Image: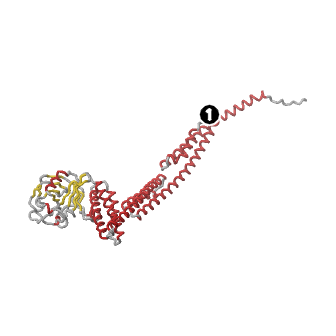
Amino acid sequence: MKRMTARPMTAKVLAPIIAVAVSIVSAGVLLWSNAATPKASAVSQQRRQALAAQLVMAEKGGYTSGDLSPITSQLKTLDGDREPWWIPGRPGFYDGRAAQVARLETQLKTLEQQLYRKAQANASEQVDAARAEIEQNRNSNAASSDVQALQQRLNTAAKVESSAHTLGAYRSAAQQAQSVLQDATTLYNETQQENQAVQQAAQQLLAQTGGDLGAIQQAGRQAAASGRNDASIAAYLSDGAMIKSSQIIQAADDRLELFAGMISSGDVSQAAQGTAGTQRYASRIHDGLIAGMPGQAVIVSFDTQHLWAYENGRVVMDNAVTTGVRGVTAYGTDFGPMKVLWKSHPWTMHSPFPSGSQYWYPDTVVQWTAFFTSTGESIHDAYWEPDSALGPGSQFNPATRSHGCIHLPFDKAQWFFNWVQVGTPVIVYPGDGTSVANQVSLITTNDQGVPNSAG
């Protein structure tokens, strides 16, 4: 029996077989790719949307585009990649993209934590630095009103910092505190320069007076009284919201009082420094008062019994007057930030008191009247009072003092009537050189000329 041997397959025979196998495998791969691609794409898109949502939340939390650029720049590159043309490669493309997005999510969380901790530390540092600079200002005798304003701003920043839970809140606190720090540094530098200027002026004062302690103290007291009076006028105007430079005047008044406390020192150098500083800030108060005045203003000093009419910061008329006095009689001239309510020419004054009263007076006709209170106080002529009787002390003389009006000579009253406008501020104030707080405490009307009381 013959043995049969296997004949090797030729390439011609194998080729069809391989082709069939390849076709079968390719078809399988294609089928798998078509099935896997949508799933991989969906997973990739879900991760991409999740990252986008995290970026939106980060922006709402205060992270800026610059903060997030390490993530967004990579994401932009990733979004620029195109799906491969080779279908079997698509599932892997989307799987790879999902993995890259996952890494970006991790990087984003790390970045947020780093920036958050940095903002938290920076806010604390800025608040502490601002607090130290404010304390330095206190020690340098900066104006207390300026220091107080800085402290209030810092308190706001510190409150934001203590309650912060987001990067944006910490950054806001840091920015507020940094602004306070910058202004506090500026104030400190300005105060140092001011202190040096006062020292130089004190040396000049010592040289001019030959070190005469009495003369130095007298000049200081005069400057203090003048500065306090001007600051009181400004405070009265501010009470009626009629002056533009109240903050400048307040700061100058704070400094004035600081130096005024040194005038009475028995040390001539100390007294000279107090007088020099008081003179410097009294001048600054006056300049601020003039610069901040409205177009027309009328100022009446009870102490000196004098009236000044201002137009655009310039005195256009002034004269001695006679007012009434409160506390001595049942009537008197009010103190306050009043204004001209109406005018009349002529006007018959009728006594508000009954004929049996010691205060009663017969009907009296005056020619030029400008009313500044709701109870009938006015600036007018007074033919029964000699012009020579007007001035300091006339308010205490029963024969000359008014029932609340302000007397002017006939020609001055006529000029005043024609010049003054309804609505022009009329400031009647003590003018006795005492502190602003004391002079303001004596206000008896509101800015509409309505008395606070009948006393």
Front-most of residues 131 and 87: 131
- Give the x, y percent position of residue 162: 46, 58
Q: Quadrant of residue 202?
A: bottom left
- Give the x, y percent position of residue 278: 32, 64
Residue at the extreme bottom of the image, as rendered: 266
Query: Is 64 left or right of 102, judged from the image as shown?
Result: left
- Give the x, y percent position of residue 200: 37, 63
Point 13% across, 52% down: residue: 345
**Amino acid beneath label 1:** Trp
Query: Is 85 left or right of 249, judged from the image as shown?
Result: right
**Residue 437 in view (yes/no):** no
Front-most of residues 181 and 376: 181
Point 45% across, 55% down: residue: 178
- Give the x, y percent position of residue 348: 11, 55
Residue at the extreme right of the image, as rendered: 1
Residue count near mark 1 (Cα–Cα under 10 Å), binned few <14, some 14–19, many ≥20:
few
Asked if 69 appears above or below 360 in the picture, the reply is above
Label 1 sits on a secondary structure element that is loop
Q: Which residue is mark 1?
A: 85
Asked if 294 appears above or below 40 in the picture, the reply is below
Count of all numbered marks drawn on residues in the image: 1
Query: Is 110 left or right of 414, judged from the image as shown?
Result: right
Query: Is 286 left or right of 354, judged from the image as shown?
Result: right
**Residue 67 in view (yes/no):** yes
Q: Quadrant of the N terminus?
A: top right
Point 12% across, 53% down: residue: 346
Q: Quadrant of residue 23?
A: top right
